[in-house]
Amino acid sequence: MTNALIVIDIQNDFCPGGALGVPDGDAVVPRLNAMMADFDAVILTQDWHPADHSSFASNHPGKSPYDMIDMSYGPQVLWPDHCVQGTHGGAFHPDLAADLADLIIRKGFRRDIDSYSAFFENDRETPTGLEGYLRTRGITDLTLAGIATDFCVHYSAVDAAGLGFNVTVDLNASCPIDLDGSLTAAIKGMKAAGVRLLGG
Ligand code: VGL
Ligand code: ZN
């Protein structure tokens, strides 16, 4: 068994004071840092959008953050501008031990498609390449944690389980956005996909 810790989107914009700040988003950082030593590989994901990204409400006249729209690939939540490439909001939280990561995988960099999952973009078929990296390193077991439990952690975990990895999500090292019941739906979806849930 070879295991990896995948730390999802611990970026300033998802922490208190950030554009899409989740209450207590920064509280999981010490726990994540401590967990890193227990794994054969540490991977960080980074939400990384161009300023004209189609998931931003500001790029859809008349729309507000958290409205839903139909994209070519299905329904999409519109978000406040966040994690714009090269900005402070897109940078990792300064206390995250990012130097200990083997790989940083960026997602959401194509204007016309959002990407919650670390494995596939929101069309559910365009790969990020992470699967190939993990397989070529012989990694079989994944622990995922970070922000947001009900979006990027959830989608990444369900995809990883679907790809045949043994997947655990550590809820004590994760933080939700919790939009219209999204946390309850995410927990249900992860359980149904065979994801092991720790804590919570
Ligand atoms: C995320 C909303 C928009 C996340 C990313 O990291 O969960 N959520 N972009
Ligand atoms: Zn995003």
Image: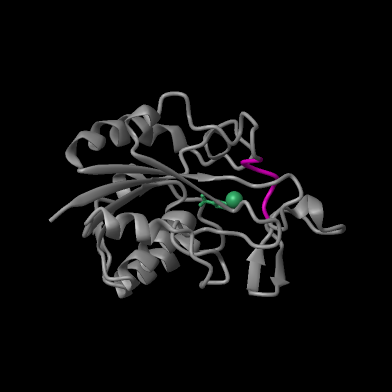
Q: Which residues are magenta?
A: 79-84
Q: What predominant SS class does the magenta segment belong to? A: loop
* Above/below status of 42 relative to 196: above
In this rendering, the answer to whether 114 lies above or below 47 is below
| 139 or 39, nearer to the observer | 139
Coordinates of residue 46 in the picture (x, y in percent) = 50, 43
- Viewer-proximal residue, 154 or 172? 154
**Residue in view at x 62 percent, y 51 percent:** 109
Using residue 152 as the reference point, say whether residue 29 is left or right of it: left
Quarter location, residue 146: top left
Q: Is residue 8 left or right of residue 89?
A: left
Toward the top, the furthest residue is 94
Q: Is residue 75 above or below residue 144?
A: below
Residue 15 visible? The answer is: yes
Report which quarter residue 44 is drawn in. Answer: top left
Q: Horizontal placement of 149 versus 52: left or right?
A: left
Q: Which is more toward the observer, 87 or 105?
A: 105
Residue at horizontal 64 percent and vertical 39 percent from the top:
85
Q: Confirm whether the magenta stretch covers residue 24.
A: no
**Color encoding of the figure:** one colour
Q: Quadrant of the N terminus?
A: bottom left
Q: Position of residue 117 (x, y in %)?
A: 47, 59
Give me the residue at 48% from left, 29% from top.
93
Count of picture labels:
0
Queried whether the magenta region covers residue 82, the answer comes back as: yes
